[in-house]
Image (tube, coloured by chain):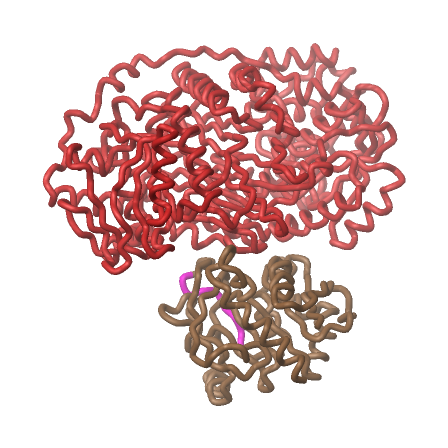
Chain colours: A brown, B red
Amino acid sequence: MKIGVITFPGSLDDVDAARAVRYAGAEPVALWHADQDLHEVHAVIVPGGFSYGDYLRCGAIARFAPVMTSVLDAARGGMPVLGICNGFQILCEAGLLPGALVRNSRLHFVCRDQWLRVENTHTAWSSRYERSAELLVPLKSGEGGYVADRSILDELEGEGRVVFRYVGKNPNGSLRDIAGISSPNGRVVGMMPHPEHAIDALTGPTDDGLGMFYSVLDSLVAA
Amino acid sequence: MTSVHTIDSVQHAESTPDLPQPYLELGLADDEYARIRDILGRRPTEAELAMYSVMWSEHCSYKSSKAHLRYFGETTTDEMRAKMLAGIGENAGVVDIGDGWAVTFKAESHNHPSYVEPYQGAATGVGGIVRDIMAMGARPLAVLDSLRFGPADAPDTRRVLPGVVAGIGGYGNCLGLPNIGGEVVFGPTYVGNPLVNALCVGAMRAEDLHLAHATGAGNKVILFGARTGLDGIGGVSVLASETFSGDESAGGRKKLPSVQVGDPFTEKVLIECCLELFGRGLVVGIQDLGGAGLSCATSELASAGDGGMHVELDRVPLRANGMTPAEILSSESQERMCAVVKPSDVDDFMAVCAKWDVTATEIGEVTDGERLVINWHGETVVDVPPRTVAHQGPVYQRPVARPSTQDDLRADTTQALWRPSDASDLEGTLVRMVAAPNLASRRWVTEQYDRYVRGNTVLAQPADTGMIRIDEETGRGVALATDCNGRYCELDPYVGAQLALAESYRNVAVSGAKPIAVTNCLNFGSPTDPGVMWQFSEAVRGLADGCRELGIPVTGGNVSFYNQTGDTAILPTPVVGVLGVIDDVRRRIPIGIGAEAGETLLLLGDTRDELDGSEWAHVVHDHLGGRPPRVDLAREKLLCEIMIAGSRDGMISAAHDLSDGGLAQALVESCLIGQTGARVILDPDMDFFVQLFSESAGRVLVAVPRTEEPRFTEMCTARGLPWRKTGVVDPESGALDIQDVASFPLDVLRTAWEGTLPALFD
């Protein structure tokens, strides 16, 4: 299985996403922002970082990158896509996921180990978890507060599209403690915390994040 | 631009020998100016004067410190030098860590800019040190920051600290470099003069080492990265001021603050671009543009190479209109590098830069001969022997005198101060100390730094040392710690510098890594004060002698003088960074206790009544006087060997260095970080207060699995390292129980420890 990891100028956690793919037993494929070709990958990860510096608004420029045109097309065709942190922001900017990410309520960048609760185990990226399982995963972002209209939030809740929720003190002011959401078909997931930094207790708080990468491989085999 | 600026060419300078020049305003002394005229055989042009003035400044030339810094070289033995691939004088020192890996690391101060403009000052401090590491051909791997501020509750600290922390985070996080450690210290002498010392570590394959050499006549000089603007010009703006009448209204020109403005995205792209250039072998020599900008880069590249270089300055891409040659040469615009490239590689070089959208411009070439010649629209504005600019600046033997107040300071010990003795006083003191700004949790600060990015961080704050994996296959990694106690250095700068070295060395060892090299960032007051120069020379001697005794070389460093407010200098603050290597990071030793089912707590080393200069004396009595703790480097070495053996054989499950706040602080942190309680039994034959709060050096608190206890203690005994069984880890209690003192519930300790900085800065 080949999983593409996009690198924009300013991407930072692309090497980490690729490592997580490798740990899960799949082959990571580097995708360059200026290249429309997805090189026959079976799924795509849009990694964390500060794409193009994010001086305008997080993800606002990256959504126009040539590679994103192909990702959007592929996602509409059912390809699993995971946006982590800046990747989540980009997927929201691109309209693949609803809502937006705003500055943390305390206005500071926050880097901490964060407990998450798995709310939906029926997405392409969360099937390996037990429902209500709690994961300890790094969160590191300055603009991680998830916001959306009440009607959208109600829709997300109603359709079970809230995939992860923060447990304990809300770290960034996200509405309804939302840490990650999915598309209606569960193939596209965006989340602020970094599961790719929780794949080995040596370098992360736990290996709780690895389940996401196994999940997508399961979904690809099943498909 | 409306005004017309007459170019002060070499020809013009020759024909106007008596033109008055503003050298004093540029910081050059009469005799320095006379020497420049002597070197050139004429008056310098405006551009040459700008180059000499920035390159002969204290910051670039080390003119007051050079005479003392030579001692580092004199005390480095061949054996110590064996692992050094590059040392003092290069952009950063490089050491061989085995398996074909070379590691480079360096610290640099950005103190004054961070006081003027905390966010940008600190941000560009990170940017500058990262480029120094890149200039060695290495991939930057991690940063650490050693910070000093005024009292935590001082109004200006509320302005400076949040800005500095946000600047370090804002820049470093965007670069994708984990921040793995450093220090935050509060003290009254830093109130008008904070210290912001940034350290960066990078790695490369040993054969990829790049040095800042411009060799090979005909090779091209390429400037790449950001455009050159009017930021960070500082004193050189004096040169421009008389040539622009009412320049506020002149098109495209406005005065900019002399603190540079950073653009971390440009730097991130520049890092990746440089690494691709290195990887493809397209670079002969490379230099970053930091302090003194192009003046420094061109003169250093040329003088370290064959000696000759020709530059067409009008080719430099600018972001402001009407910049003069002098301004272009001294601009400190960030995110720029200068490379020397073979003519046959120029096209490939440019293609890599284009891929990363990095502006790159061929500005000149390496020439035969020994002159650095810089043209501006066809006229020669600089024609100098580059070594006279870069390396032959003035060297001063500043007066050195031990302050007359030093004896009184040393006589004013803590012996007469009130000490807690009964259990309830000790209990109150412990809780008060844990919450003191210098001992409280740094989480408010470190939570703003990304410590995870790139996935190789094995240890980071609040660990004693930061540890980074370098080789994912073998697990080989490096550990880094920075330390300095300015109070000890004030009491005795020689011993104080050795204590800083000992603590940093010990912190590295406590993680299980073997210390192999040292860098420093020497922060002092004004070199024109003989007392400050005495502190400086003592600290340098102490550090160099200490390194010789420990057998690890100083591979580089940085000096920052003039850290004072009025006549009051900061405490002498020679920050010492120690680099260690560990064969396999999986054997690292964490701080937190409770990882194993049953653990015994052992205190290694000797505890003496050493409270002078301690955190206790500072917090409880606002007292500074007496003698610093004794330093015993042979003991530190032994302790280090024991820690490494313990790590290698899996005998130690957790360890924490004892330093500020003594055993009490180490116990509290070990419990809170491990989220596990402990039962502690103090030595009934020794004063409890001394046991809990003395800051005797050479001590480590270790947690040893019960099964390993006999083997470990036998090893200590056999090697002659004193140890004492201090207690046991108690996962059930949820408290730190110190028998005959008090039982401290962990949540009470956590509230005290973690509450201080948020209460002050949120």
Of the pair B427 and B686, the residue shown nearer to us: B686
- Membership of B62 in magenta stretch: no
Q: In the image, B283: left or right of B734?
A: right
Quadrant occupied by the N terminus of chain B: top right
Q: Position of residue A99 (x, y in %)?
A: 53, 77
| Bounds of the magenta segment | A99-106
Looking at the image, residue B525 lies above or below residue A59: above
Q: Is residue B178 visible?
A: yes
Q: How many marks overall?
A: 0
Q: Position of residue B708 (x, y in %)?
A: 37, 46
Point 59% across, 54% down: residue: B454
Our reading of the magenta stretch's main secondary structure is loop
Looking at the image, residue B539 lies above or below residue B273: above
Looking at the image, residue B13 lies above or below residue B94: above
Of the pair B36 and B188, the residue shown nearer to us: B188
Of the pair B605 and B615, the residue shown nearer to us: B605
Q: In the image, A15: left or right of B711?
A: right
Q: In the image, A109: left or right of A66?
A: left
Q: Is residue B314 visible?
A: no
Of the pair A197 and B761, the residue shown nearer to us: A197
Quadrant occupied by the C terminus of chain B: bottom left
Q: In the image, B279: left or right of A163?
A: right
Give the farthest residue toward the right.
B344
Q: Position of residue B181 (x, y in %)?
A: 46, 44
Point 25% across, 28% down: residue: B608
Which of the 4 quarters of the picture holds residue B573?
top left
Q: Position of residue B658 (x, y in %)?
A: 33, 38
Which of the 4 quarters of the picture holds residue B301?
top right
